[in-house]
Amino acid sequence: MFPADLTARAAALIDRCRRNRLMLATAESCTGGLIAGLITSVSGSSDALDCGFVTYSNAAKVRMIGVPPDLIARHGAVSEEVARAMAEGALANSAADVAVAVTGVAGPGGGTAAKPVGLVHCAAARRGLPAVHRELRLGGIGRGAVRLETVRVAIEMAYGIVGP
């Protein structure tokens, strides 16, 4: 289902989590569960994945992982601030030690001048450490390609924050 290199990277993430005795959580908007889907495509993923939150709507972001509604009102759902809050909220509402979160405009519609199609904000958080953020500007490469590249970046961010 996923490209072989991406599946291999998810397997490496699971191994790294096992070695460090850490559990993962995902909080996904524009990827709609693909990050958790990739992780669970690897045998043994239950050793490393606690849960995944698909928080596509703003209401779900607030209700399921505690993103403050005023944060969404001030910055918009597609923002660094909301991505960080999503990662932190996934930690607060799970037994995970590490969380990745993504929110963006996958397209082909929905973009604006300020938040164009292909803009994605990714965040990764680990208990006791500040969340890290990465902004992607992928352009109009197609909905599927935006989502897949976002999954790739999220896996890399999780891999980096898990530790050696």
Image: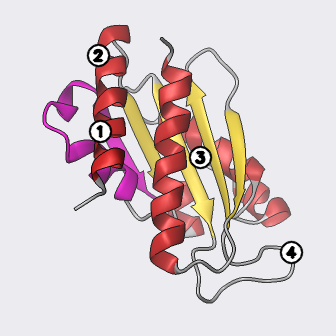
Q: Along the polypeptide, which appears first: circle 1 or circle 2?
A: 1
- Label 3: which secondary element: helix
Dot 4, how many residues are within 10 Å of its Cα: few (below 14), some (14-19), or many (20+)?
A: few
User: Nearest the camera: 117 or 126?
Assistant: 117
Residue with the mark numbered 2: 18
Location of residue 129 with respect to 13 vertically, above or below: above
Task: Provide residue 83's location: percent of width, then percent of height.
Answer: 65, 49
Q: Amino acid at mark 4?
A: Ala
- Numbered disc in front, either 2 or 3: 2
Q: Secondary structure at mark 1?
A: helix
Establish if 30 lies above or below 88. Answer: below
Do we see residue 140 in this rendering?
yes
Q: Work out how far the residue at label 2 is from the one at label 3, CA to CA, in angstroms.
A: 24 Å
Residue on which disc 1 sits: 8
Q: Image height check: is 63 above or below 106?
A: above
Determine contact: label 2, label 4, CB under 8 Å. no
Q: Is residue 88 above or below residue 105?
A: above
Q: What range of the chain is rendered magenta?
A: 34-56
Q: Position of residue 123 (x, y in %)?
A: 63, 42
The residue furthest front is 5
> Which residue is tagged 4?
114
